Image (tube, rainbow, N blue to C red):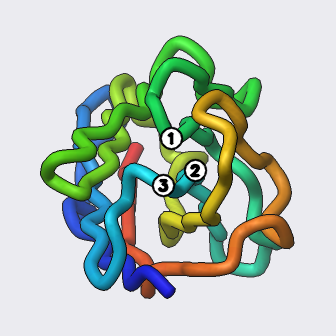
């Protein structure tokens, strides 16, 4: 199994930007599709975005389209989540997740399709 560690969270004001990183170890991340999920206090975990092994395919939740960008640097075993124009409703713990996949263009949007998860990084956006 691949091990994942997120970083980059913090306390920011509405309109600010943050870049989260998800660093993998134990396996080469290039064989995994990766997703980001978030969970706000008192709410269920929700899908944010996903990226295929190759990075050529991405998908975003409606709530973050145009503001968030997922990317990956396979030689660095890292996936990034660039978050711009942050809103208070983006406040949550953010988790990256990975699942081995043979297709270079597939990704997953359901949490149950991911088998490896990081511990999360907290993002707080003040108004």
Structural crowding at the residue carrying mark 1, measured as other residues with C-alpha within 10 Å and reported as few (<14), some (14–19) or many (≥20): many
Determine the CA span between mark 3 and mark 2.
7 Å
Position of 87 compared to 40: left or right?
left
Task: Find numbered disc 1 in the image and state the secondary structure of the residue it sits on.
Answer: loop
Query: Which residue is rendered at x = 25% and y = 32% of the image?
Result: 16
x and y percent of residue 6 in the render?
31, 71
Reading the image, the residue beneath label 2 is: 33
Query: Which residue is rendered at x = 45% and y = 28% of the image?
Result: 55
Task: Give the farthest residue toward the front.
Answer: 102
Q: State the image quarter where residue 57 is shown.
A: top right
Image height of 57 relative to 45, above or below: above
Determine the CA span between mark 1 and mark 2.
5 Å
Structural crowding at the residue carrying mark 3, measured as other residues with C-alpha within 10 Å and reported as few (<14), some (14–19) or many (≥20): some
Q: Are marks 1 and 2 in contact (CB under 8 Å)?
A: yes
Reading the image, the residue beneath label 3 is: 31
Circle nearer the N terminus (1, 2): 2
Circle nearer the N terminus (1, 3): 3
Image height of 91 relative to 80, above or below: below
Q: State the image quarter where residue 46 is shown.
A: bottom right
Label ID, residue 53: 1
Query: Which residue is rendered at x = 25% and y = 54% of the image?
Result: 78
Mark 3 or 2, closer to the camera: 3
Structural crowding at the residue carrying mark 2, measured as other residues with C-alpha within 10 Å and reported as few (<14), some (14–19) or many (≥20): many
| Nearer-the-camera pick, 100 or 112 | 100
Quarter of the figure that contains the C terminus: top left
Determine the CA span between mark 1 and mark 3.
6 Å
x and y percent of residue 93 in the render?
50, 71
Task: Find numbered disc 2 in the image and state the secondary structure of the residue it sits on.
Answer: strand
Position of 73 compared to 99: left or right?
left
Image height of 95 relative to 115, above or below: above
Q: Are marks 1 and 3 in contact (CB under 8 Å)?
A: yes
């Amino acid at each position: 199994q691949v091990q994942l560690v997120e970083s980059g969270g913090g306390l920011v004001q509405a309109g600010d930007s943050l870049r989260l990183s998800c660093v993998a170890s134990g396996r080469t991340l290039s064989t995994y599709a990766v997703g980001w999920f978030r969970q706000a206090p008192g709410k269920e975990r929700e899908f944010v975005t996903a990226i295929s092994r190759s990075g050529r395919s991405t998908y975003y939740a409606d709530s973050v389209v145009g503001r968030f960008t997922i990317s990956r640097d396979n030689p660095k075993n890292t996936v990034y989540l660039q978050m711009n124009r942050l809103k208070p409703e983006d406040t949550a713990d953010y988790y990256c997740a990975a699942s081995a996949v043979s297709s270079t263009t597939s990704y997953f949007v359901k949490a149950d399709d991911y088998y490896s998860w990081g511990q999360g990084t907290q993002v707080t956006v003040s108004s």
